[in-house]
Image (cartoon, rainbow, N blue to C red):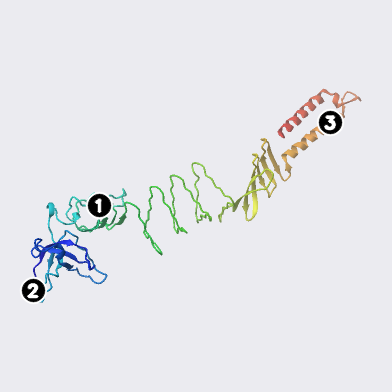
Amino acid sequence: MKEYIAIVTNENDPERYKRSQVRAFELFPEHLISEKDLPWATYKLPLGARFNEGAFIAAQKGDYVWVDFPFSDSNGNEDTTRPRITGWVHHCPNSLPNLPHEAFNGPASLEGMHMRPGDDDIEQPEANMRADAISLWGTVFEFVRNGVFRLTQKTTGTAIEFSRSGHGGFYSQNNLFLTARQKLKLIGSHIEIKAKNTLRFAVNALEFNLNRFVMNVKGLLHIKGTGGTKITGADMSVVATQGNMNLNSAGILNQSASGANVEKIGIDTLLSTDEAKVIEVHLNGMVLAKISISTTGAITFEEPMTGGKIGLEDTGLILAENSAGSIKKSLEDLIGKLEEFIDASKDVVIDTGNGPGKVNASSVSNYIQIKTGLTQVKTNLAMVLK
């Protein structure tokens, strides 16, 4: 059966049968057959074509194709009203094959367009590859002879690729979306995510089940949970920052560890006149220590179990107290005793040792020195208490 070279003149089938109108030059010359009278051709489809299955690439207007006439008319001759497209004509307009340029490294091939991120794990595309290619509607399928498969969008360079070494990659030059109605699972012995700017998770719940978790942040690390934030671990160490570290809580700030001395630290605002902030250290429900910081600048540290207390008042005075009483009270009592001793000593009668005569101590010069010294001690103690 003879085949004829024809050109496709129309691809818009009025019956929507996906036929193409063709002009076989030997049979339908332009000076004898007008375009509207040309026959509509069907296709000789590849294996696997069936209803809603198989592969199909339609001819476009201006394509050169091979046609034959497999059907006979009532006289047993070729029915020229029912042509069949059997394939495309291989020709070289402008000295270039009418093939995808990836097949022969033509000037319009994608060589040099597949730019990959600078990562040691990512193979860069090989130059001057020999490929079998399918190019359709701005998308190119390349089957490279060294084992590479690549699907590329021509205008952007976005590509899906399997390299010669068996690496697989999706290289998007714009946004990349992975969606799953149910479970999306990533499995690998080593999974690495890099983001030049922001890595954001917008999810209802984020859970990590890991043997080891390392987070290195050059800038700000901000962990925020409106419903609560909890970090637990069998073995966890916190290394202080080289700058400031702030732990803020509008309510209760809890710290717990099975082997630690401190079970809970609670920060509460007391309804006192000086509006002091109180930090309490608890163990098994018992208050071990309490630190009070008032808005006036006074600081007090208490040990409720023993009654010990040390403080710095806003005047700069240091106070200390234990179960036996405060140092301030003890000093006040000592000053009082000194005053009583000074007042009482003036009536003391002293034996002069020079006979039976006796005189009052107030008349002795040494007494005057003693009284002066005790008075100075009293004054100094009083200054401490100011």
In the picture of the structure, the residue carrying the numbered disc 2 is 77
Q: Is residue 381 left or right of residue 5?
A: right
For the residues carrying marks 2 and 1, which lies nearer the camera in this image? Answer: 2
Q: Amino acid at mark 3?
A: Asp
- At x 38%, y 50%, the residue is 195
Q: Nearer the viewer, residue 106 or 339?
A: 106
- At x 16%, y 54%, the residue is 104
Q: Amino acid at mark 1?
A: Pro
Instruction: Tell me the quadrant of the picture where the C terminus can be found.
Output: top right
Q: Position of residue 3 (x, y in %)?
A: 10, 66
Q: Which mark is residue 343?
A: 3
Quarter of the image for residue 98 reads bottom left
Quarter of the image for residue 56 reads bottom left
Marks 3 and 1, how far apart at CA: 106 Å
Q: Earlier in the sequence, mark 3 or mark 2?
A: 2
Marks 3 and 2, how far apart at CA: 153 Å
Q: Nearer the viewer, residue 226 or 154?
A: 154
Mark 2 residue crowding within 10 angstroms, few (<14) / some (14–19) / many (20+)? few
